[in-house]
Image (cartoon, rainbow, N blue to C red):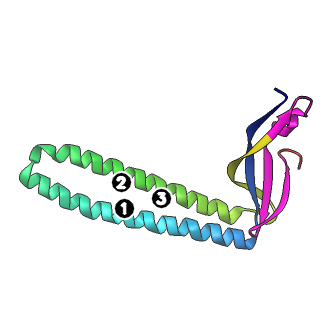
Amino acid sequence: MERVTVTRPVIIKVVVTEDYKKGLAAQLRESLRRTEIELQRLEFEGRRQLMELEKHHPAGVAAARERLAQEKKKREELRQGLLEKLQLVVQLELGTEVVHGQLESLVEVAVGDSWRRLMAVEIVVRDGLIVAIREAGTG
């Protein structure tokens, strides 16, 4: 066997611009708004369910309260994480590159090829356009 096709990681980076910061902040605020709505719904439905359980199945009230508390805690942790991310977005410096995600690509390698061909590749995006494709770590 002289050749083989393998996958390698492709790191997607975004150049921080005002538009990027505004868009990311808007996404985070929308997620925060949905999380707040979920918390309110959970609180309302939880109270209603607990009242029903107290009437018809008093033995299940403690377990239901625990489940409700766990669900609320998850949403509150999510909300706190979103708030922290929103604060970080404000602090992003224009022109810096931030990791946005990761994909995979196929690469064919052959006997005698450089090992570096298997290393990660970076795609740099600015305002929705690819501005660079480079081997990871080459700057």
Q: Quadrant of residue 60?
A: top left
Q: Quadrant of residue 5?
A: top right
Residue under the image location 43 percent in, 55 percent down:
76
Pointer 3: what residue? Answer: 79
Residue range in magenta is: 108-135
Looking at the picture, tell me which residue is in the foreground, 117 or 48.
117
Q: Is residue 71 toward the left or the right of residue 131 in the image?
A: left
Residue 16: x, y in percent?
A: 76, 64
Pointer 2: what residue? Answer: 72
Pointer 1: what residue? Answer: 39
Q: Could you give the CA–CA distance between mark 2 and mark 3, rounded to whole angstroms?
A: 10 Å
**Residue flagged by tag 1: what amino acid is it?**
Leu
Label 3, secondary structure: give it. Answer: helix
Give yes or no for contact between labels 1 and 2 (Cβ–Cβ under 8 Å).
yes
Residue 30: x, y in percent?
A: 51, 69
Residue 89: x, y in percent?
A: 66, 63
Residue under the image location 11 percent in, 43 percent down:
59
Q: Is residue 28 above or below residue 73?
A: below
Residue under the image location 34 percent in, 65 percent down:
40
Q: Is residue 52 toward the left or the right of residue 82 in the image?
A: left
Looking at the picture, tell me which residue is in the foreground, 85 or 134.
134
Residue under the image location 43 percent in, 63 percent down:
35
**Residue flagged by tag 3: what amino acid is it?**
Arg
**Residue flagged by tag 2: what amino acid is it?**
Lys
**In the rendered structure, does residue 18 fall within the stretch colored magenta?**
no
| Disc on the earlier residue, 1 or 2 | 1
